[in-house]
Image (cartoon, grey):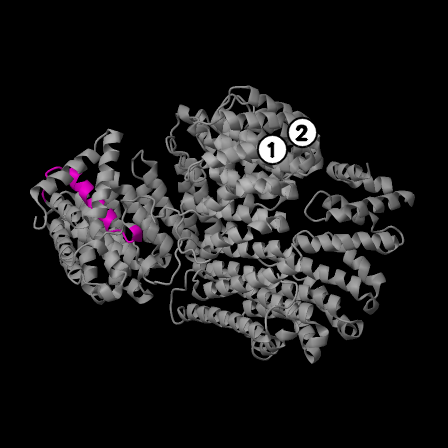
Amino acid sequence: MEGVSEAQIQSVLTMLTAVLSPNNEVRKQQEVLLMQLRNEHPNELVLCLLHILRHSPDSSIRTLSSVILRQLFTSLHSSTKVWDKLSSQVQNIVKTHLLESLEQETSWPILKKIGEVIAELAVLLFADEETNKWTELLPFLTRSFTGQGKQAAAACHILAGLCTFFNDELVKEKDSLKQVFIAHLASNELELRLSVLNFLGNLLGIAEKDDMKFFWDIIPNMLLSAFWIIENHQIHAEEALNHLRDLAETEPKYFKNRIQIAYEFVDRVCNLQTENLGIKHLALEFIVALAGRLNLEFQEKKDIATNLCTKIFQMMLSIDEDVDPAWACPPEGFEEPDDEDEEGVEIDYAKLGRKQLTKMLEGVGESFLLPTVLGLIQSALTTPSEDWRVKYAALMTISELGQFIEEAEKIAEIVPVLQAHTSPNLHPKIRYAAYHCIGQLSEDYEEEFQSAHHQAVVPLLVAGIADSIPRVAASAADALGKFIENCGPTLVSEYIAGIMPVIIEKFSQQNCSIVIEQILTVISNIADSGKECFNPYYQPLMVVLLRIIKAYTSKEYQRIRGKAIESMTMICTSVGKEMFSPYVTETIMLLKEIQDSVTDSDPLKAYLLGAWQRIVATLQADFAPYLHGILPGLLSAAGASAIVSVESEPDALVDLASLVSDANKKVSISTSDLEDKDLALHALITIIDVLKELYAPYAEQTNTIVLPLINYTPNEHIRQAAATLCGSLINSVKALNTPESDQAVINMARLYLGALWQATAVEHDTETIVAQLAAIKVIIEGPKNKFMTPEEVTASGEKLIKMLETSLDRRARNKALDLGEEDSEDELIKEINKNEEDSLHTQISEVLGSLFKTHREFSLEIVNFLYSHVLSKFLAPDTTDEDHKFAIFVIDDVVEFVGQDLAGDKWSSLAEALVRFTADSNDAVRQAASYGIGILAIFSNAAAFAPWTDQILVALDKSINFPMGTNKKSHGHAKDNAVAALGKIIKYQSGSINSATIVPAWVNLLPLRRDKEEAKLMHDLLADITISNMALTIGENNERLEHVVKIFAEILETKLINTETVPKVKQIIQMIQAAGIPTLPQIWATLTDIQRSKLTKIMA
């Protein structure tokens, strides 16, 4: 080849041959030489590779040449990008020779590889529109695509990856394109059919709606072609089905009004006589994806939805009857997979099937399909069968249905069924499924399931840990861990004496790693839930855990070692600093030693980063002496460069246009390196927040790491954590509380605000903007005194209002896309966008509140602008619920932080708006307005509040009794805030109400369960009122005594009560006992065992 000698070509050929050697040392040496050649002589290397790609008779060498060329031209790593180092002459040769190679190559696998080189280079060139000089590419690809054979397939394969760049040109030729698609879908060339399915999927994924409709009538051709591939080339069936499933997930509306033929296609696939369940699974995945997005159409065709549920269940029963021994006793280091796809172990399609049934119920609607699914389960469990797979499938399905069953009675009916299926005489997979189901119910119902069924469940799970099959024992341990996680100390104390000996004995026996890992989780959860009752077991377990961490050092035990680190630090947190103190130095030195020895990709890094957070939370200020030795490793992890890729398979073709089409757009690339970087930042945040002023000496050192990460392009989570860390550093230096530190805080605040406001201006990820605004709020509130000028405060307000306007414009554009269209915007996407914009609006209002709070007098210009130009518009009846909520949030902040004196004549208007929306039909609006009423009660003087009292009480009554809609949770939050507002009126505006009437009504509405913060406040208020005037809460004739006692008995040892309230509850019980109330024994008898135990415990 021109430009290189035969000797140079032979030298590179020798290197390539050596790279394929099975000898690792030889291979590594040649790879180093190739990299050296790349850096020093890129022109010669590229020319040699092109020659070898064209002329080598060895297909493996040609394949390797194409792979290396693709790596050289990648657009992802600018530091290793070779293209810009090539001479213009060589660049032209590359483009010409690649296209010629595509024309001449006869091997399909190598054709694909050459196509991927072309696509990679095209992305590199097309990323910069001004320097795009490969004008020959599209005409060449179009000409090749309209031809026949493998070259047409290769061109199609390339276009599939580049259709974003060529979309406009392709759409102009859509008439001829459609005819070519139809012809190729009927081709006898397998590769051509597969490439067309891929190309069509990608093209439709970016097409405008009218263009998508143009190709609508190709659906039958696509499905027929896919079935031809499945029937005649099963080895490629999954590839064809993946293309269909991906299209269904990204563009479900393409199949609108085509559900019948989609179902017929799936029915034909499911009826094929094949042992490959993966094919049937993917076919079902395809139509289940449609069911989740075209739910109304599936509701109209209920017979199809019902038949699909039956087909899914039938697939679940089709798993292999012979259980792989590797399932019963997995190899050391095995991890129970989240995605049910067990590498090295047979795929469990019963597990996959239950996920599909869940998607059907979520998508089509549980009211439509739950009876069908329950009927399938009932039949499977009650019909006599010697086939273990029937009951296994039924039990695995039950584990998914808890989220759809609200009636406690139905759950109670399930528990005996699960008990019956843990018998040692049954097949191990049945026992496994029963324990798995208990674990899932423990998560779905949290405290309710534990409280109602502990007597039946705990002994069952403890016995299950001793099962002779390791996988079953691990399942029982996993379920016990989940059950214990949501128990309070009282319930744990009843069973800990029976659980811990079994747990400790497991460590003295030879056990499979999967069992030990689950046992470690059980220990962590018992310590966390059991509190003081765990203390007697702490010392012997610390010895065991330290031994495991030191002994389990081989690669297959990395996760056991990590779990032991996690468990050890969790139990230290549980028992507290005093009990932990004898082990502090040994623990920290051991973890530091591990931290100093782990490699960048070691999974132990994540466990270590979590461990430091727990240790600092336990030791508090006593952690500071160890910080100088630990911090360098944390800062190194936070600042480390991550090796990033947008793909899991380096040789796979990806469409990179979405990453490079906007030069300013931040992208999100996730790798284990970035996850560790994120964890390191969060560990730093925890350490700084706990140590406060003790961390201040390291603030400047940390600052150099953090500031650049505010604009860290590859991953939005890093940008979010960096923003949060800025706020933590501010509070750390602030805690020094010296004149010098006060000035330093102001300087830091100005620096961080400048960087963060700049970052928000170019940030495209809404969640990241929300995180940046949250940090801005913390920073604004950092300095002790006002530090911004009136002009700076106004400018900040203007930025927020501009951000709001931009968000509203986005919303308007999204709505405009739906106008006049038969197909509505994809509901899921709309919901995600709506939630993101909603979160943004909330955070904008939070930052406005911080400005009002810290720069009260300087904020009047912003307040006046909002009052005149925003609130009136947002509160109008014809605007959206989101607009109403944003306006109410702003009003809440004005009431709380600006105050009645500065708000002046606006106060009555603000109060009127709160009253009007307190009974709004939207839960979120109702909640915000009810919260605002409570704030109004706190910050209004009696004279200003009194005229509104009657209207407010009527509005709150409507809010409290507002009928529940579709969302139980949001309705509960709204109701809790209305009840809390009533409580605040009782506390702060008692002169405006009849307490003898209002207080009893309020007591009857307690306890609060949804809004935990408001619940804590109200339950503390109940305690205060009861102590000061017991007759007012329990009644003159003790008519509410049982209710009040049950409130306190229920909320003890939950997240619904502050620790400061517990002594008050004890005082109240003592007062009730001293009063000699005759009905007290009967009331005591009505309590549950756990409630009596909790009250007895605080009285001890």
> Which of pointers 1 and 2 lies earlier in the amino acid sequence?
2
Q: CA distance from mark 1 to mark 2?
A: 29 Å
Q: In x, y percent, where is residue 848?
A: 59, 68
Task: Look at the image and say whether residue 97 sits in the magenta stretch.
Answer: no
Q: Callout 1, which amino acid?
A: Thr
How many residues crowd around disc 1 within 10 Å: few (fewer than 14), some, or many (20 or more)?
few
Mark number displayed over residue 282: none
Disc 2 residue type (three-letter): Ile
| Residue 783 appears left or right of 258 | right
Which numbered disc, 1 or 2, marks the residue closer to the eye?
1
- The stretch of residues the image draws in magenta is 55-79
Badge number at residue 585:
1
Vertical relation: 195 (above or below) 802: above
Q: Quadrant of residue 448?
A: top right
Residue at image coords 60%, 25%: 543
- The reply to whether discs 1 and 2 touch (Cβ–Cβ < 8 Å) is no
Residue furthest front as drawn: 740
Q: Is residue 902 above or below residue 35?
A: below
Q: Quadrant of the C terminus?
A: top right
759 w.r.t. 654: above or below? below
Q: Nearer the viewer, residue 796 or 35?
A: 35
Mark 2 lies on residue:
496
Residue 777 is at least partly visible in this image: no
Q: Quadrant of residue 819?
A: bottom left
Where is residue 202? Give x, y as percent: 29, 55
Q: Position of residue 914 (x, y in %)?
A: 67, 70
The picture places residue 39, in percent across and down from the top left corner, at 23, 47
